[in-house]
Amino acid sequence: MDNKLNNSVAEQVQYIKNQAAQAAAACGRAPGEVQIMAVTKTVAPEYVNQAIAAGITLLGENRAQELLEKYDRYNKEGVSIHFIGHLQTNKVRQIIDKVDMIHSVGSLHLAQEIHRQAEKIGKVMPVLVEVNIGEEDSKSGIAPQQLMQLLEEMSKLSHISVQGLMAIPPICEKETENDQYFCKMEQLFIDIKQKKLDNVNMNILSMGMSRDYQRAIQFGANVVRLGTAIFGSRQ
Ligand SMILES: *Cc1c(COP(=O)(O)O)cnc(C)c1O
C-alpha cells in the first residue's frame, strides 16, 4: 500500500480516537460507547498490525478472498474481525469460522446460509442487518419498508443472533447531507429496540466512515468504520 498520509498509522489512530471522543462528548455520550473499526481493504497486514499496536481492537473486512490471504498475518490477540462487505452465499462457508460478526446481511437468503453454515460448526453468528437507507438501486441491503419482515424471519434462525443495524448512506456532496439518512437509521434502531423481538437485539448501530463518522456519532452510531482516515487513500 502507498500510505499517502504524512502521519503514521499510530498518529492517525490517536487523532481519530480524540475526534470520536469529542463528537461523543458533544452529544452527551461517553467516549467509550463508540468503537472504532479499522477497515483493512487493500491495506497490507503490516499497516493493519500498526493500527492494532496503536490500540485498534476491531477490524473490518470486505472480501472473503482478501481476508483468507491476510488472516494469518494479523496480530489477532484481543482483536475482533467483522465482515462488512457484500457477501455471496457461496463464500459464507470460507469465513464463518474466522469472523466474529457479519454486518452486511440484507436478505433472508443470505441469513439462511449463514445460519446453515454456523450450525455446521456449532456456532451462533452475530449479525447486523444492512439497511439500504438511501433506497439506491446500486446498493445491497434491505429496503427500510421491508426491514421488519426480514427481522421477523431472521429471529427464527437459531444459529444467527441479530445484534443491530448497519448502513452505507448515499455519497453526498456535502457531509451534512447524510444527516437525513443517519437520522432515519437512528429512528429505525430505536423503534425496533422498543419492539423487543425475540432473538433480535439492537446493541450495535454501525454507520459513519472516514468523511462523516463524527456526524454519525451524533446520530447514535456506536461502531464507525474507518479506512482512509487511518491508512490513507486506497489505489
Ligand atoms: C471501505 C469501507 C469503509 C471505509 O471507508 P473509508 O471512506 O475509507 O473510511 C467502511 N465501510 C464499508 C462497508 C466499506 O466498504
Image (tube, rainbow, N blue to C red):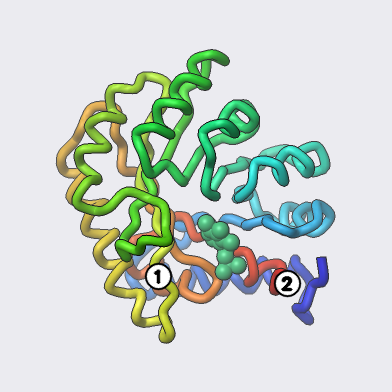
Q: Going 36% across and 61% down the picture, which residue do you hit? A: 137
The span from disc 2 to disc 1 (Cα, nearest Å) is: 29 Å
- Reply above or below: 80 against 199: below
- Residue at 46% across / 74% down in the picture? 212
Pointer 1 residue: 170
User: Considering the numbered disc 2 on the image, is that residue within a helix, a strand or a loop?
Assistant: helix
Q: Amino acid at mark 2?
A: Glu
Q: Quadrant of residue 30?
A: bottom left
Residue 219: x and y in percent read 32, 66
Category of crowding for the residue at label 1, using alpha-carbon neighbours closer than 10 angstroms: few (below 14), some (14–19), many (at least 20): some
Which sits in the foreground, 164 or 26?
164
Outermost residue to the bottom: 174
| Residue at horizontal 38 percent and vertical 50 percent from the top | 141
Query: Camera-side residue: 155 or 205?
Result: 155
Which residue is at the front of the view, 216 or 143? 143
In the figure, 90 relative to 42: above or below? above
Residue for badge 2: 11
Query: Residue 188, percent across and down?
Result: 23, 54
Quadrant into which the N terminus falls: bottom right
Does the beta carbon of the residue at mark 1 sit less than 8 Å from ligand 1? no
Q: Earlier in the sequence, mark 2 or mark 1?
A: 2
Percent x, y of residue 48: 75, 55
Q: Can I make out residue 17 in this image?
A: no
Label 2 Cα neighbours within 10 Å, binned few <14 / some 14-19 / many ≥20: some
In this image, 139 relative to 63: left or right?
Answer: left
Q: Nearer the viewer, mark 2 or mark 1?
A: 1
